[in-house]
Image (cartoon, helix red, strand yellow):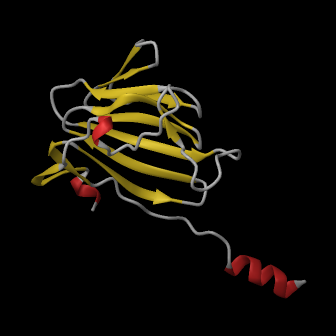
Amino acid sequence: MESAAKAKTAEAPKAQLFSLKTPYMKQGRVTQTVTKTENMWIAVKINAEGGENEIHTHLNQDHAFIVLEGEMSVFDENGVEMKVKPFQGVNLPKGAYYRYLNTGPGNLVVLRFGAYTPDRPAKGEAVRLMPDGTPILGGSEENKSLPPIEMAGRFFAESAG
């Protein structure tokens, strides 16, 4: 019994340090995953303009956005707008339709938390859908993505290393 306890301790998950340092953008957007586990991940999203511009839902995850800098507008499938300011957030459970836009004067910096739901679609099936059931990729032309261009030498949370 003692050796099983030692083996279990040796395989125990460990705490992970991560940094939010992410480049500011001249154009487009960047999503930088800063840490992840089997069921959860955290990313920093920085948008120079735009956002995720087509209404969609995720069939495999609950997620939330917290605005760290700038301002975002989040719209539901009926066009109802929520203004989200720094240190406010929006929770998007699996199946909730939304799109978001950077509506502030500078870059929008958002912390994105995601967690897989237990009943997610099988591997290979679409997980991000528009209201008509059409799959859509986040970085696609259909989602009005622009080629990302970083601001040379400018970072959000630069002191975080």
Q: Is residue 45 left or right of residue 56?
A: left
Q: Is residue 47 left or right of residue 128?
A: left
Residue 5 left/right relative to 152: right
Residue drawn 42% across and 40% down?
A: 136
Question: Toward the viewer: 29 or 70?
Answer: 29
Residue, x 77% and y 83% (percent of image)? 6
For residue 115, above or below residue 69? below
- Residue at x 32%, y 36% (from the top left corner): 143
Taking the image as drawn, is residue 36 in sight? yes
* Quadrant holding the C terminus: bottom left
Farthest residue, direction left: 152
- Residue 88 seen from this side: no
Establish if 100 lies above or below 24: above
Tell how many labels.
0
Question: Residue extending furthest right?
Answer: 1
Tell me residue 144's x, y (percent): 26, 35
Q: Position of residue 4 (x, y in %)?
A: 83, 83
For residue 51, what is the image quadrant?
top left
State which quarter of the image contains the N terminus: bottom right
Q: Is residue 129 left or right of residue 12?
A: left
Residue located farthest toward the bottom when viewing the structure as drawn: 3
Front-lying residue, 142 or 114? 142
Percent across and percent down for residue 58 are 53, 38
